Amino acid sequence: MNEKGDTSVAEFKTHLTVSSFCSSAAATFLLAASLATPDEVLLFFIMGVVGGLLPDIDSDSSLPVRLLFTFIATVISFLIMFNQGADNSAAELFTIWLVSFFVVNFLFFSMFTRITVHRGIIHSVPASFVFWFSSTLILYHFFSFSMQTVWMAGFFVFGGFLIHLLLDELVSLDLFGNGPKRSSGTAFKFANPRDLKSTVAVYGLAALLFAATPDYTPFVRTYFSPDSFASLRVFPDKGWFTHLYRTYLSRWQTKPKGAPGKPAGDPSFHRMNTPLTR
């Protein structure tokens, strides 16, 4: 149940848990298939979790959403600061960060909540494409990631966003309760019949953002070619965790014998273990 007693949508904690689990699993598969580095796995995980929380960003009465917007404002402020010249002083850089944070977290958030309605067109499938393409553009222009990496990071936002919509829709169906609720069909939607102007605007914005994105060919070739996951082993060939066991066993067998934390050749170790003579 959310803060207003409405059980027709999933709770913030549920969305956070599910998006974290799904993002972790997907990023792990990419790592196991040698399609992502550890740094990229962390990036993909964060983007997936953020995407899993974004559909409720138009809920101005929710404390978790307020915290999410603060987090987004913090990240954007750092991106703006990182894009400044190296000749700026620490005071100038911090002032730039502070002003950016204030504008995004307070002015932009206030304007955003005024022009949006909770579970309106932001809580829809076309909005997921808007956040996918906008995330790709931000990462591409403010960071030195490759084109396939920024596209995949945006794809994690897209995936997390869709998981949120599907979860809300499943909760509204109430399959194990009294049947579909009045909110059924309002979560996973492609348009808002009550607000056609915003629907057209979101579709148009998605098209404009896609036109501005970098080339998606490396993204498709890297992650969706027939040989992309050729090296992926979903389950172990022999026993479970044999490599982990052998690694730690080998380290334990080659560990110098002596006091904990002290190698056998350490002079202080010999002094500690030499009997005192009078």
Image: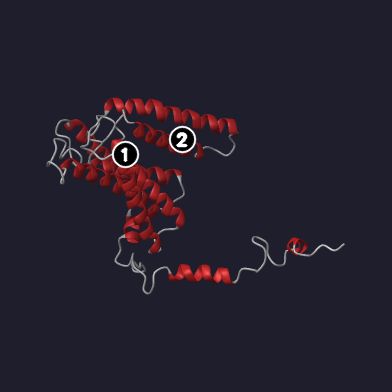
- Identify the residue shown where x is 32% and y is 67%: 227
Residue 233 % position (x, y):
35, 68
Residue sitting farthest toward the front: 278
* Three-letter code for the amino acid on which mark 1 is drawn: Phe
**Which part of the image, by quadrant, shows the N terminus?**
top left
Helix, strand or loop at label 2? It is helix
Q: Nearer the viewer, residue 176 or 129?
A: 176
Residue at image mark 1:
12
Residue 17 % position (x, y):
33, 46
- Identify the residue shown where x is 35% and y is 56%: 25
| Residue 184 seen in this snapshot | yes
Residue at image mark 2:
77
Q: Which numbered disc flags the more N-terminal residue, 1 or 2?
A: 1
Q: Nearer the viewer, residue 84 or 33?
A: 33
* Three-letter code for the amino acid on which mark 2 is drawn: Ser
Disc 1 residue crowd, few under 14, some 14–19, many 20+, Cα 10 Å = many
Residue 138 % position (x, y):
40, 42
Residue 44 as seen in the image, left or right of residue 274: left
Residue 176 to residue 273: above or below? above
Residue 37 % position (x, y):
44, 58
Which of the 4 quarters of the picture holds residue 125? top left
Helix, strand or loop at label 1? It is helix
* Marks 1 and 2 close (CB-CB < 8 Å): no
